Amino acid sequence: MKRTVWPQLRFQNKSILNNFIINNKTVTIKNYSNNILIRNTEGTINDKVYFPCGKADFDSIRKSKQFYVDKTNFIPLMENTGNQLFFVRPPRWGKSLLLSMLASYYDINKKDEFNELFSGLWIGDEKNWTVGKNQFYILKLDFSIIDTCGSVEHVEKNFHDCMNDLIFKFLIRYNMTHAVKINESNALSTFQRLVIVLSEREEKVNFMVLIDEYDRFANKLMFENHENYRLIVEGKRGEPTSSPIRSFFELLKWSSSAAGFREFRSITTGVTPIALAGASENISLDTTFGDLVGFTENDLRNALNNVNIIGIDQDTTISAIKKYYNGYYFPGSKHALFNTTLSLYFLKKVVTDESFRNSVIEKKDIPISTLTDINTMISENVFATLETFTVLIEIIQKLFSKGYVEVSQFINPYLKLGETADPLLEDLSRTYDKTLSFMYYHGMITLTEESSKQLTPKQLVIPNEIVKDQYLKQLQRLVYVKENDVTTFINEPSQDNLKLLFNNMLEKQEGIYDNSMTEIQLRDSIESVMRAYCLFRNKDLEILEEKEDNVEYPKSKERASLIMRYSKDVFIIEFKRIRPNALTKFNNIKRWNSQIYQNTFKDLMKLSDDELLEMEVIAKVKARSILNSAIFDLKQQHTKYQNDKSRNIHKFVVLVPIGVLAPPLVVRKVD
């Protein structure tokens, strides 16, 4: 049933008075925070503008009575933490809107607008005001608008032009164009002159610099032109001042010590914690600010209340949002957090697209392609950078097989992008942590709920279906499954064809799995690759869930089976493994790693199946006995498929005799 009934006017909390025109009559209501409905003269909700998707202008959102989640209770906490703050979160998490709100609160020019902008919010209550309220000159800088194309000279000119333009807007806003001359060739000189003029005023002033997307400039260069990155961001070796962006942050540090200010503050936001901003207090991993940006479930329920999606319909909508967008935890997060831009994109679609709204409420399958757009997806440049790391495929497959990954030591509080672009391959542990840190900061993985409460968070997971879908797209590209191999196996499901399919798939992945991985985790890793293949290249081939006649088996009896279906054929592939330290031949090796796998098994990979099966396990059992036992067990299992006479059932056992999912594999078809 289609639901097209729109809400009647209502209010829930008390605060200031507002006038609305409904049916050509002026109606006065009270509002609080974001519980505000926008209506036109016909009395219907103005749904096209209520959810400000992609909008980061606090003043405009508040004056237009659009949906806004109150974060003003963090203002005194930020003031008390330090004068120079540094904060990073993944792209499109509301950092720009946060800075816009802070600018409106602190701006000395906006005293007369305070009630209009902040009444109804936490900071709007006089008892919550801080001494900094409307007391600062605010310089807003945005490095995301700097063009990074062209030569080094051209990019540096763009940097200076951008900074000069933003400083000039500041001078106009505060009627200071006569006091500071713009140095068109050197914006750093302009900035230095501005600081001097403000600090030397007879009546001391407060000065605040807000820097949005400080690292976008550096990230663009790293992704697009490594040489320009080194020259412009890192600077010449031994000459840090040769880098304009490094020089700016040195000036920022110098400004904080200028004696003439009553108070100097700066707040810098971005995605990755490059060491450029090292002079500032990094609050990104501070548990106090775990919820500084992002939406909670309660925030979204308030939003749905305001558009009259309530009761069961609201619960169903929240479940859909959770599935696709939820799951993020940062240090100190009290609740799972939703990406702000994606959530607003979803909410706006719910109220503007009737077909989409009905699909959500009626629990229909929703194509993931309709739940995001190109601007909210993980950048291809990010994946391209990650491909330079030798551990990427291992990390992705562990995320799908184990369900989580762990850093060896800790999430790096700062990253050096030069090292990120050229990872140190000889230090795998460091590369592993650096890769996971890079993925964490870009929102590709997130902390588990338990880990977010720990002093040194270590465990990381895929946050939601949107991110999982993008991983699968990359996985099917990185771990290439040959179309002809799959077709050959489907048409003639022999053990040789299955072995060929797996060997070709795994030939570039030897030795990436550790000794602790179980058979089920090995199965899950290969399943993730096949699932990506089915999703993007052959939708007729399905991956089936392993449920044996709806009977739940204890963990000790769980089967490590990959089950696929194509037309009338069902393929059941059971994985068995022998841990390498269980083989008599290698029981003298105490520590196993990728290098040992590669060196020790060089000759082993040349052995025939029969030679591999004659290997002895420490318990004096040969590998052949383990294979035969698995074959016997498989014959007794999956009876629901055997009883289906309309299906052709093909059973296989894959024995992994060296402990990792890589060649050599022993494959046997079970009659």
Image (spheres, rainbow, N blue to C red):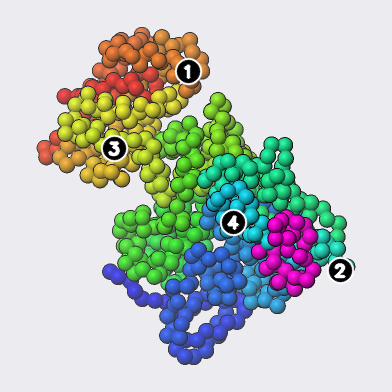
Quadrant for the C terminus in the image: top left
The magenta span reads 165-194
Query: What x and y, as percent, mark residue 364?
Result: 30, 58
- Label 4, label 3: how far apart the Cα atoms are: 52 Å
**Secondary structure beneath label 3:** loop
In this rendering, which labeled residue sits more in front, label 4 or label 3?
Answer: 4
Residue ID at (63%, 42%): 231
Which circle's residue, 4 or 1, is located before the other in the chain?
Answer: 4
Identify which amino acid the numbered label 3 is placed on: Glu
- Label 3, label 1: how far apart the Cα atoms are: 34 Å
Identify which amino acid the numbered label 2 is placed on: Glu
Q: Which mark is residue 546?
A: 3
Identify which amino acid the numbered label 4 is placed on: Ile
Q: Which mark is residue 203?
A: 2
Confirm or deny contact between disc 4 and disc 1 (CB under 8 A): no
Left or right of 59: which side holds 394? left
